[in-house]
Image (cartoon, rainbow, N blue to C red):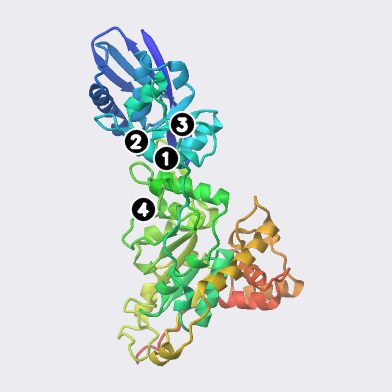
């Protein structure tokens, strides 16, 4: 009887948890048994391993082969367990040295000919392996992704035969090439937006402070155009943020060619998306759109058209910066610190406030449509903006506005002031800052107190108004929030839309 071990990982959110693959070959009827709570994809590994060995001219011994995935009470999901199972079997057969295999963790999916296919989660697995003093074996195409962990030896193998030859000393697997930085999607220039000075100002404030933004206006008024230009105003991710965002995309299998994500992500799901697609979940508890938008922007166009359950699922992550997928077997938490940008028409037909084209059902049409957004969700929107479309004459003769580069420079300077105030380990933007960390003059505080009482602001609305005021002060390079900053911030709080009078 012989026993061999290999190191592998199971994923709980973006955390890689160590799994020990134990293989015992003993006397008995020929059989290949897998235990340790494997899902269907893991259970099918025995057939892929058998086929891969056969393609190399090897065969399992005519004995009882038992594979145990420890700890046995942790659910094992995914085809990435193929490679560690195959390596542990080869070590139990004395084909590769068990002592050298123990210095590595591994993940990869096997083809029937022994080729290694790409899998999700290589970056968090490489980080976890480095923390444990282990190297990592992964598919060759994902070697640059594993290299971003910056710790431990990485063996990017094209197939199982290359690994056997490497461990037996007849072939050397070269270290991975230096990974590339992701360029991000093409950015649209804010100079394309003509006129609309109030909207441009609100967009700059939202970018500078990471504030949530809701735009309300008729069809074709420029809401989607403005939202598409927000990513061009945001600064690059810090090294820590880039690694965290890339880990989420790696778990989701979306890290293209192992390129590290350096720009804030911009996600714009369709309004038919389910709550699990937005908040995370599904059969394997994958990260949702709010996690894929971590440290970036989640844009919901035609926001009232999303199912109510989907919109309500945003409320807790907007406050906590994370989302928890609850299952009977486990609770999985993903980061979800995103900036929510929504766009909506004032009513279903879109022309509620247009006296020349208002529908016959006004104002009931607008009341019913806007009630699809709950009060608690609206209260979490720092900036609510009425989009007033330009007339044909204004559109034809309006001068181009400032470019994205000019506005982005002011945004970057404001963000730098916030980082200097909160420190590297503090909030990343004013939208995350506690109220007591925002310096404000006595006059401005008294004004905010009186306005909050008169406007019946909630405690959340009070704090969010102060945060917007702090961002306005940063854009003005003021050390403390002034009264006029609070006044402008209050102007962005939600107001009931103007409704046409009921027909008599």
Q: Residues under labels 1 and 2: Cα distance? A: 10 Å
Question: Of 259 and 122, which appears nearest the observer?
Answer: 259
Residue at left 54%, top 29%?
Answer: 132
Where residue 199 sits: x, y (%)? 50, 78
Q: Earlier in the sequence, mark 2 or mark 4?
A: 2
Q: Which residue is mark 3?
A: 136
Mark 3 and mark 1 lie on one chain; the one further toward the N terminus is: 1
Residue labelled with disc 1: 121
Q: Position of residue 48 (x, y in %)?
A: 26, 28
Q: Is residue 34 left or right of residue 199?
A: left
Rendering coords of residue 128 (x, y %): 51, 34
Q: If you read the primary sequence from the N terminus, does the residue marked by circle 1 or circle 4 appear first?
A: 1
Find disc 4 in the rendering and name its residue. 277
User: In terms of sequence position, does the residue under pointer 3 or pointer 4 come before the other?
Assistant: 3
Q: Position of residue 427 (x, y in %)?
A: 62, 55
Camera-side residue: 190 or 287? 190
Labels 3, 2: front one: 3
Q: Are marks 1 and 2 in contact (CB under 8 Å)?
A: yes
Q: Residue at x 67, y 74 (%)?
A: 476
């Amino acid at each position: 009887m012989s026993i061999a071990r290999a190191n592998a990982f199971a994923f709980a959110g973006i955390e890689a948890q160590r799994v020990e693959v134990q293989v015992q070959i003993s006397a008995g009827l020929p059989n290949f048994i897998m235990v340790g709570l494997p899902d269907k994809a893991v259970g099918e590994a025995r057939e892929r391993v058998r086929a891969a060995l056969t393609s190399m001219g090897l065969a399992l011994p005519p004995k009882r082969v038992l594979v145990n995935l420890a700890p046995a009470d942790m659910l094992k999901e995914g085809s990435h367990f193929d490679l560690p199972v195959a390596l542990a079997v080869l070590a139990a057969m004395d084909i590769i040295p068990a002592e050298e295999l123990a210095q590595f963790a591994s993940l990869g999916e096997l083809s029937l000919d022994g080729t290694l296919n790409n899998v999700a989660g290589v970056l968090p697995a490489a980080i976890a392996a480095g923390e444990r003093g282990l190297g990592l074996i992964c598919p060759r195409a994902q070697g640059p992704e594993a290299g971003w962990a910056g710790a431990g030896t990485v063996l990017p193998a094209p197939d199982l035969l290359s690994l056997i030859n490497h461990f037996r000393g007849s072939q050397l697997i070269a270290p991975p090439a230096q990974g590339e930085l992701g360029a991000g999607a093409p950015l649209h220039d804010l100079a394309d937006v003509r006129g609309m000075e109030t909207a441009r100002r609100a967009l700059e404030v939202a970018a500078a402070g990471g504030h949530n933004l809701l735009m309300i206006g008729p069809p074709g008024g420029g809401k989607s155009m403005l939202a598409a230009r927000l990513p061009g105003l945001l600064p690059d991710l810090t090294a820590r943020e880039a690694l965290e965002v890339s880990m989420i995309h790696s778990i989701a299998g979306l890290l293209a060619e192992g390129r590290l994500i350096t720009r804030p992500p911009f996600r714009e799901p369709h309004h038919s998306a389910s709550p699990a697609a937005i908040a995370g979940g599904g059969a394997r508890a994958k990260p949702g759109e709010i996690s894929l938008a971590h440290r970036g922007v989640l844009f919901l166009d035609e926001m009232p058209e999303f199912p109510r359950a989907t919109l309500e699922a945003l409320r807790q992550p907007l406050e906590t910066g994370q989302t928890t997928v609850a299952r009977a077997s486990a609770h999985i938490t993903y980061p979800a610190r995103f900036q929510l940008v929504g766009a909506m028409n004032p009513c279903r037909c879109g022309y509620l406030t247009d006296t020349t084209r208002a529908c016959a059902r006004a104002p009931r049409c607008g009341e019913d449509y806007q009630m699809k957004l709950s009060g608690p969700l609206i209260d979490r929107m720092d900036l609510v903006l009425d989009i007033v479309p330009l007339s044909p004459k204004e559109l034809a003769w309006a001068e181009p506005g400032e470019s994205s580069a000019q506005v982005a420079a002011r945004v970057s300077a404001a963000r730098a002031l916030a980082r200097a105030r909160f420190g590297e380990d503090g909030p990343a933007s004013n939208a995350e800052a506690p109220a007591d960390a925002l310096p404000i003059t006595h006059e401005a505080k008294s004004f905010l107190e009186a306005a909050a009482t008169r406007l019946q602001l909630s405690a959340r609305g009070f704090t969010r108004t102060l945060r917007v005021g702090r961002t306005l002060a940063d854009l003005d390079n003021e050390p403390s929030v002034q009264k006029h900053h609070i006044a402008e911030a209050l102007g962005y709080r939600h107001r009931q839309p103007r409704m046409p009078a009921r027909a008599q």
